[in-house]
Amino acid sequence: MKSSPIRLKQKLSPKASAAKKARDKKAAMSPARKAKKAENQRLGQRSNSDLHHTKSGAVKRVSIKNNRGNFGKGTKTE
């Protein structure tokens, strides 16, 4: 069975990989990210929807289909 393409590792040099790991950790541990994680835990996740954090700071529950497809706009322009 082939693995999912999402799980493929990036082909980075050891130096670049270490730098990326540090950047990712810093972003994940930022106050804004920590607040979003805590809020997601309080609200609870369901299997039929995603929690969408808007730019205004609000959180709304949206269908997985809408959230993945950028609400009908697609992802080519992102």
Image: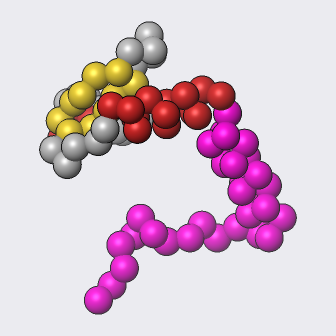
Q: Quadrant of the C terminus?
A: top left
* Overall secondary structure of the magenta section: helix
Left or right: 28 as drawn, with respect to 13? left
Q: Is residue 44 magenta?
A: no
Q: Position of residue 66 (x, y in %)?
A: 20, 34
Q: Position of residue 34 (x, y in %)?
A: 58, 34
**Does 40 appear above or below 53?**
below
Q: Position of residue 44 (x, y in %)?
A: 31, 38
- Residue 51 in sight: yes
Span colored in magenta: 1-30
Q: For the image shown, how many numbered marks are present on the structure? A: 0
Residue drawn at x 37%, y 79% as measured from the top left:
3
Question: What sort of colour scheme is used for the picture?
Answer: secondary structure
Closer to the camera, 61 or 74?
61
**Does 75 appear above or below 62?**
below
Q: Position of residue 71 (x, y in %)?
A: 23, 28
Left or right: 1 as drawn, with respect to 78? left
Q: Quadrant of residue 76?
A: top left
Q: Quadrant of residue 33?
A: top right
Closer to the camera, 76 or 11?
11
Q: Is residue 11 magenta?
A: yes
Left or right: 43 as drawn, with respect to 27? left
Q: Quadrant of the N terminus?
A: bottom left
- Residue 77 in sight: no
Residue sitting at the far front: 42
Left or right: 47 as drawn, with respect to 17? left
Residue drawn at x 65%, y 28% as measured from the top left:
31
Residue sitting at the far top: 56
**Does 64 appear above or below 73?**
below
